[in-house]
Amino acid sequence: MATQYETLLKIIDRRRSIRAFDSKPIEPEDLDKIIEAARLAPSSNNTQPWRFVVVRDPQKRRDLTLAQPLGIPSPIKFAAEAPVIIACCSKPHALLHKAARVFGKDYCEIDAAIAVEHMILAATALGIGTCWLGWFSEPKVKKILEIPGGVKVIALLPLGYPQKTQKKDFRQRPRPKGMGNLGGTPRKELKDIVSYERWW
Ligand SMILES: Cc1cc2nc3c(=O)[nH]c(=O)nc-3n(C[C@H](O)[C@H](O)[C@H](O)COP(=O)(O)O)c2cc1C
């Protein structure tokens, strides 16, 4: 029987950025399961500053994927094919704002990012594809979804069943075999990302 670590690593390893989606809908129960994984994420002082706007409406999905800075052709149009796009947001929090001033880190964004990755892994475990999208005009996305002023949109997350043609995407090339390469897009070797006792 697989250990919990093996099961977890298999899901982590299987995850890929999916950029070609089938039109098959996401069952509401599966969507709930994915969001539940975000709800359980850790956060600074348990402030849970993440907020998620679930977008299923086809026109809104198209609008979101076309929301680019002026003059830039959209590289994320593919995401409109996904039956669901979640706008992943961080809501300002007084305590975290203070902490950010002291420690120089945006804990709201860090917390929301952790929650997003929880969703990505939960989706992977359910056989549902995702791709973290950071390439969008935040003001335009906020306007489309009527998101209030201080809230930040940290990612758009399409959710859908992967299409078979996905493998043709150049970003999906297999990783070379060997330590530190768990399959999929290439990864740095362990020695390049970890040092012990002091910086390299
Ligand atoms: C913060 C962040 C922003 C990203 N933005 C985009 C994006 O706008 N468009 C896109 O196609 N992929 C985007 N990606 C996906 C990365 O390109 C992808 O994770 C990386 O190439 C590794 O491939 P893999 O996810 O298949 O392992 C983003 C990933 C992260 C973590």
Image: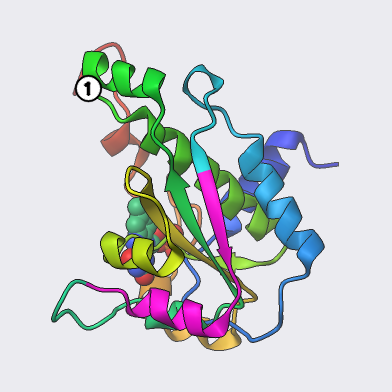
Q: Does residue 162 appear to the left or right of 151 in the view shown? A: right
Task: Name the quadrant where ligand 1 sits.
Answer: bottom left
Range covered by the magenta-colored residues: 51-68
Q: Does residue 4 appear to the left or right of 48 in the view shown? A: right
Q: Does residue 192 appear to the left or right of 87 in the view shown? A: left
Q: Does residue 182 appear to the left or right of 33 in the view shown? A: left
Q: For the point 66% across and 34% down, which residue is it?
A: 40
Q: Quadrant of residue 103?
A: top left
Q: In this view, does 30 lie above or below 189?
A: below
Q: In which quarter of the image is residue 14?
A: bottom right
Foreground pick, 66 / 191 = 66
- What amino acid is at disc 1? Gly
Q: Of helix, strand and loop, which one carries label 1?
A: loop
Q: Give the quarter of the figure containing the C terminus.
A: top left
Does the magenta segment cover residue 58? Answer: yes
Foreground pick, 34 / 95 = 95
Residue projecting furthest to the right: 1
Q: Position of residue 121 (x, y in %)?
A: 61, 51
Q: Name the residue under label 1.
A: 104
Q: Quadrant of residue 7?
A: top right
Does the magenta segment cover residue 40? Answer: no
Q: Position of residue 114 (x, y in %)?
A: 49, 39
* Residue 107 shows up from this direction: yes
The total number of labels drawn is 1
Q: Give the quarter of the figure containing the N terminus.
A: top right
Q: Position of residue 44 (x, y in %)?
A: 47, 22
Q: For the point 75% across and 52% down, which residue is it?
A: 33
Q: Where is residue 125 in the image (x, y as percent from the top left)?
A: 70, 56
Foreground pick, 22 / 57 = 57
* Residue 179 shows up from this direction: no
Residue projecting furthest to the left: 71
Q: In this view, does 95 lie above or below 164?
A: above
